[in-house]
Image (cartoon, rainbow, N blue to C red):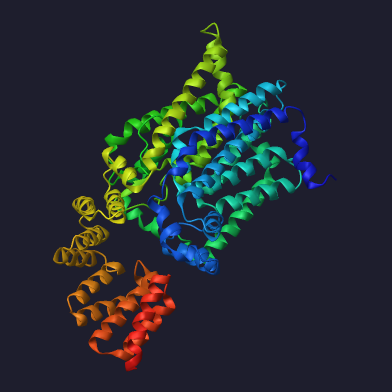
Amino acid sequence: MQPLPSRIVRPFLNGGLIAALSGAMMVSLLVLVTYWPARENGFVWDDWVPLVDSPVFRDPARWREAMLTAPLKDPVGVRPFAMLSFMFQLWAGQREPGPFHVVNLSIHAANAFLLVVLVWRVLAPDPSRRKAALAAALSGLVYGLHPALTEPVVWISGRYDLMMTFFLLLALLLDRTLPAGGWTRALLVSAAFVSAVLSKETAVGFLLALPFVHLALDRPQAGPLNRARLAETLVRNYRVYAALLLASVLYLAVRLAVFGTSLGMQRMVTQFGDVGPPGQRILAVAASLSQYVGDALWPFRNRIPSRSFPLPIDATDVLPMIAASAGVLVAVILAARAGAARRVQALLFLAFVASLVPVSNLLPLPGRIGELWAASRYLAFPLAVLFLAAPFTFHIVEKWLSRHFSYPRSLLAVVVIAWLAASVADIRATIPLWKNDGTLNYWAIQNGARSYWRYQNLGDYYLRIGAPQQARKAFLSAVNLRSDVGLNWYYLGLAEAGLGNTAQAKDAFRKALERDRSLLNARINLAKIELAAGRHGKAAALLEESLERLPQSDRPEQEGVLRYLLGQSYVALGRREDAAAQLEAALALARNAGERDAAEKALRSLAPTR
């Protein structure tokens, strides 16, 4: 029996490998060069919390807290592999956004490389190996420069999708390379899948897509697509399916251990109430899938980040898009009954659609109140599946052109070059729009995405750069859109406080708490206003209530700040023993040098009278 490394490498050593690898390296280089300006962009949106604002991610000694406790504060998924990639960079002292952007670009370039090699493996039996290498390189290049993927590449937090895609492409490459018999292939494919799902949970779409990939690529020249062909495919690959089933059970066990019986899906399940009756749920899924199909087939349009569908969904707004996508799907299914090339193309398109199911709002994606999301970053892996069909598409188009034009290959080359040129221009135009939260959210708002949380993000940017007047204007817009959302009032209170409008700030914080009692920071800021006004008893009462509500609050990590302020209140009230106890607790909970120094200074001021 051959050793494992030989079994992996041997299938590639059949000629054409050097051409394929050369093409893959060239594709990776072109992708890197195109996206290289993105390294000058800053942190935006979800980047701030893990990479800047949360000291737990920067301290190697607190890695367990970062890996196991952090997901509980925002229960979307268990993503240790992707989180570790961020933490390794932070532990190495990288604090600026540039290095994080470079890693994202490198992962995307690696994904394009893997796709070229994977497509070449699919085409390897082609007697014209040079042609197969060229088709593989073109497939990888069109994928690597697809404008719909700009979001996960230039947004640092898009790394979850990029890493997931890397491991799933590796799984497909192993699946197409290793012999079908035996368990080696099954175990390695499932190991790559586990790595993917531990980078981002939407990797479960791979489980739905893989049978279609097998149907398309296992003996593609075989007879018609029928039940016998389906049974043969399932039997041929049963070890892979069994191993993936076991891997899925293990992954669910991990989620059970971290989140309990909710499996971290409580937020998604409760959002069914926002979506409404079954008709709205069907519309949500159809509109989401149609959005992805449209982005994949024609990405040269306005692609604001995390586009949303306001609830309830207006059928007249989405039906044209749904009808167009349904027409494409019907044409693809009919094509599956035609010749071998069209059947492969059609089945891979169905694999693409299947891989989108987890992000199609079948379960509502964790979004904001009154909205559903359909973000282009979710296309990172599904597009790779779709571009497995690119060589077959090139072949079909070339045959059609040959019946109508004199130089079909030249015309096809012009079309591909024009597409790539438009893609590069689109990417280069979009990169600066992600430069900072101000530019990003202003762009989105100006293009019709007037969701309240975009105004929150815009206002937060203005607060960070010291422009409270502009922040106030943004937060007022958020309040005008959704006055029932407590966070909108809380942020407005911050802007009013920054402008010195104490009465207005106090009123905004109170309105925030009326709408959401869990907003710990709103209560803390109210207490600060009371302390500054000399109303120490009111401040202490607010802070004591905050301590009681701490387990249900939105910011339990603020306990140290809370106890420090309570200690200061007790000092002013003459309760020095109580003050000392709170300040000592604040010192133990300090998250940074500033908090530690403040607690120590307050304790020293108590020392002479204790």
Task: Measuring from the top left, give residue 281's x and y in whole percent.
Answer: 35, 46
Residue in the picture at 72% in, 21% down = 127
Q: Is residue 582 visible?
A: no
The answer to which image quadrant residue 426 occupies is: top left
Q: Residue at x 60, y 59 (%)?
A: 250
Quarter of the image where the C terminus is located: bottom left
Report the side of 349 relative to 12 (left or right).
Answer: left
Report whether 27 appears left or right of 582: right
State the image coordinates of residue 13 (x, y, percent, origin top left): 77, 33
Query: Which part of the image, by quadrant, shows the N terminus?
Result: top right
Q: In the figure, 122 relative to 338: above or below?
A: below
Residue at 42%, 64% in the rendered image:
73
Q: Is residue 421 visible?
A: yes
Give the quadrant of residue 285: top left
Q: Nearer the viewer, residue 526 or 249?
A: 526
25 is higher (above) or lower (below) than 397: below
